[in-house]
Amino acid sequence: MVDRPIRILVVSDAWHPQVNGVVQTLSMVAGELSGLGHVVEVIGPDRFRTVAMPTYRSIRVALLPARRLARMVEAFRPDALHVATEGPLGLAARRWAIRRGLAFTTSFHTRFTEYLQARLGAPTGLAYAWLRRFHNAGSATMVATPSLQRELGGRGFRNVRAWTRGVDLARFHPSPVAAPARPRPVFLYVGRLAIEKNLEAFLSLDLPGTKVVIGDGPQREALARAYPGAQFLGERHGEALAEAYAGADVFPSLTDTFGLVLLESLASGTPIAAHPVTGPADILDGAAPGVGALDTALRAAALRALSGDRAACRRHAERFSWRACAEAFLANLVVVGKPG
């Protein structure tokens, strides 16, 4: 689609200071695209009055952003508009583009349907109907994995396009630094501590060694009380996070649309263990022996992954780059005046 430098506007309800895979992906892609000569701007909740998200008060969403957002979009004069999320900002950007007859793309980052069911008991059928309506108004919906692309296509989502992810291979790498003294093997989880992540399925496993949990969220205190044998370290960033990955023996994964944390673990030489579902199954597709283990029983996968090959994990992670991710994103964009 793009053979010249263009002005790219991304509207996202997930942005700094939030810490999650969506923010990391958009940050890295914006940096890569800027390096290619494009002008990129991300509009997030940090530019608006915000309110705490129900059931997740550490995340704040924009309050009645439509008019101010419209002024921002018009001032930027984008050649391409990407609506990254389905929250208040995403809804306002979608509505702005539809009213003007302009094309835009969207992306499907998170399984909100399953999360709403876990938190509120909401029927997934109704949620998917709403999401389908949201995304089908755009010219294309970008997804991280082939299996999710097939799944959403089967649910009636139109023009679903592949948009893989990358990993910072300089930051995350095998490290000779000795891990903190704790009984081994070390099973590491990194991510939100929230009900939809089903942390109990990991923390309740009968595993040798130590379970380490990095991250924060509404369930942290309750989980720490319920599982005193696990080590809850809170959020970690930069070298502290990289050392935690490199110092673990296995990274169990339970629920991920893609799982940037899985790539970070593999780049650090730590094999992954997961259910055979979208995300882990896609990442391990074509992997050499020793990179990870998939099993419907997470305990069995975790124990098998203990015999993983750390060098093979690193080699597999090197297949994923942020430059390739940015180039795929760029190829999926559409010019605002031309529906895709």
Image (cartoon, helix red, strand yellow):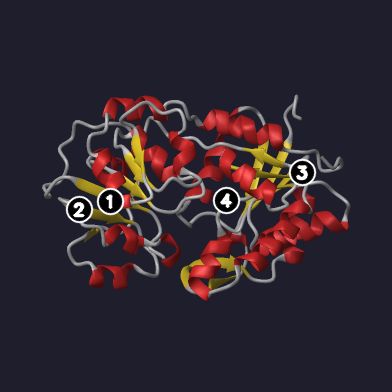
Of the image marks 4 and 2, the number of the one nearer the N terminus: 4
Question: On screen, 294 above or below 233?
Answer: above
Which residue lies under the disc numbered 4?
109
| Coordinates of residue 231 in the picture (x, y in percent) | 21, 59
**SS at mark 4 in the image:** loop
Label 4, label 2: how far apart the Cα atoms are: 31 Å
Q: Amino acid at mark 3?
A: Pro
Which residue lies under the disc numbered 2?
207
Which residue lies under the disc numbered 1?
299
Look at 48% across and 74% down and name the residue there: 55
The residue nearer to you, when weighing 198 against 4, is 198
Q: Amino acid at mark 1?
A: Arg
Q: Residues within 10 Å of mark 1 (few under 14, many from 20)?
A: many
Label 3, label 1: how far apart the Cα atoms are: 49 Å
**SS at mark 3 in the image:** loop
Question: On screen, 33 above or below 10?
Answer: above
Label 3, label 2: how far apart the Cα atoms are: 52 Å
- Nearer the observer, disc 1 or disc 4? 1
- For the N terminus, which image quadrant? top right
Q: Residues within 10 Å of mark 4 (few under 14, many from 20)?
A: some
| Coordinates of residue 88 in the picture (x, y in percent) | 66, 65
Of the image marks 1 and 2, the number of the one nearer the N terminus: 2
- Nearer the observer, disc 3 or disc 1? 1
Which residue lies under the disc numbered 3?
78
Asked whether the beta carbons under mark 3 and mark 2 sit within 8 Å of each other, the answer is no
- Nearer the observer, disc 4 or disc 3? 4
Look at 19% across and 67% down and name the residue there: 228
| Coordinates of residue 128 in the picture (x, y in percent) | 66, 61
Of the image marks 3 and 1, the number of the one nearer the N terminus: 3
Question: On screen, 218 above or below 46?
Answer: below
Q: Amino acid at mark 2?
A: Leu
Look at 17% across and 42% down and name the residue there: 179
